[in-house]
Structure formats: C-alpha cells, structure tokens
Image: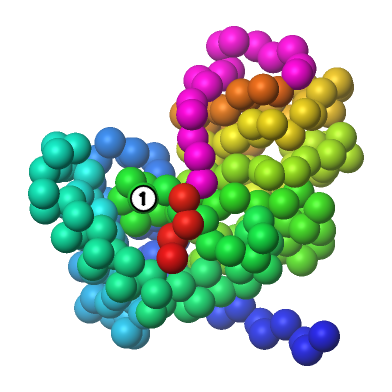
Amino acid sequence: MPPRKSTPAPRPEVLAFLRAARETPDDDAPRLVLADWLEEHGDEHDSARAALVRLQCERARLDADDPRGADLLREEAKLWNKHTNAWFGPMRDFCFGRRHHTHADRRGLLYLCVEGRKILTRAGMDLAGTEPYAWVEGLRFSTLSRDGCTKLAGSDLLDGLASLSLSRTNVKGAPFVELISSPRLGGLLQLDLYQVNAPFRQSRSRRTSAGCARSN
C-alpha cells in the first residue's frame, strides 16, 4: 500500500468560520462569510466550495415545490463530481463502501456515513483536528461494535458534532450508555437511535429519520 499523503495544516480562519457555523446552525451568515473568505484566499477547490455553500444555502430557503430547486441540485452535482476528491481528502477511506455521503441540505457542511471498524483506528481518529474533518457536522455509523462505542466515547471525532446516528447498529450495554453520555456530545442537536435495542435517556435523544444520500 503506498504511503498516505500528509494532510496540510488546517487554516485557522477556516476552522474559526466552521466553528461559528456549527454553533449557529440556523444562521446562514457564518457560512456565507466563510464562502467569501474561501473565494478571496483559496484555490480553485476552495472557490468551488464557496459556490457550493451559496447554492445549498439558497436551496434551503426555497419551498419544496419551487422549480428552481432542481436547477440548483444540478449545479451542486457538477461541483461534487469535479471536486469531491479535494474536498474529502483522507476521509474517503473511512466512508461506508468507500463512497462519499452527505446530506443535501447541510448548507455546505458534511454528514458522513462511516464504518466503525475503519474510522475507529489510529488513522481514522487522526482525522480529528484536520481541516477536511472540520467540515463534518454529523456522523452516521453503518457498523459499530461494543469496543467501538468505548473508543468513540473518548474520541476527538465527537467534538463539535451536531448530529449522530447509530441507527440499526444494534449497540447496547454499558459501552452504549457511555457513548451517549459522553460530555463530548454537549453540542449534539440530533441523536438517531432508530432500531437500536438499548436503553437510553430520552432527554439526550432527538430521534430523526436521517439517512445517507450519495453526493455523486
């Protein structure tokens, strides 16, 4: 296997703008300020990402039956097809089925479907703190073991997440309770436990029907 390319050091400005976007999920302003910064200071992939942020923010404001939505989706698809590799970087190796998954209405931020056995390795957990991972506001685990629950509960991968899905993973027992009680999930807005056969505290859960849609 060829050696993994090193990930460039994260840009402090990008991290700060992304933190503001996650902390104010109902406000487009931090996302649009980030888009302006990327266009002014970044490369072609950054400029394309700025365009994606603006397109998704615009589409999120449309009514569901607005015909402009289809045109915006087509423009988004073109951007994904051309820039996915640059945007995801090392995260590609940890996505479920080695495909790239994102919610269509995350307004620029990412929701990844991942496999626990892959991302909860040293290489996977090293993603935390990188700029590509800073764009992630939600994780959905397609698989997760008891040992994986314990690893995840103490992992930096949880820091700043707004959404976490354990749907259909069949996790249970003390490791599961440890995970959903982790103080690292203090900013969580959505916790999907659909068909999880385990006890949990209702106060920590806002079950959603979150799924995974291919980005390309």
Q: Residues within 10 Å of mark 1 (few under 14, many from 20)?
A: some
Q: Does residue 102 sit above or below 205 in this rendering?
A: below
Observer-nearest of 24 and 104: 104
Q: Is residue 133 left or right of residue 73?
A: right
What's the residue at 58%, 36% (across, down)? 164
Q: Quadrant of residue 25?
A: top left
- In the orientation shown, which residue stands out farthest toward the bottom? 2
Q: Does residue 190 sit above or below 101 in this rendering?
A: above
Q: Quadrant of residue 118?
A: bottom right
What's the residue at 53%, 62% (across, down)? 100
Q: Quadrant of residue 193?
A: top right
Q: Can you give x and y, in whole percent of width and height, for residue 6 in the image?
A: 66, 82
Q: Is residue 118 visible?
A: yes
SS label for mark 1: loop
Q: Does residue 140 sit above or below 90 in this rendering?
A: above
Q: Is residue 107 left or right of residue 188?
A: left
Q: Can you give x and y, in whole percent of width and height, for residue 93 in the image?
A: 68, 68
Residue under label 1: 104
Q: Quadrant of the N terminus?
A: bottom right
- Callout 1 amino acid: Ala
The residue range painted magenta reads: 197-212
Q: Is residue 187 visible?
A: no
Q: Is residue 186 left or right of residue 106?
A: right
Q: Is residue 39 left or right of residue 197?
A: left
- In the orientation shown, which residue stands out farthest toward the left? 67
> How many marks overall?
1
What's the residue at 47%, 50% (across, down)? 213
Q: Can you give x and y, in whole percent of width and height, for residue 66 in the image?
A: 11, 43
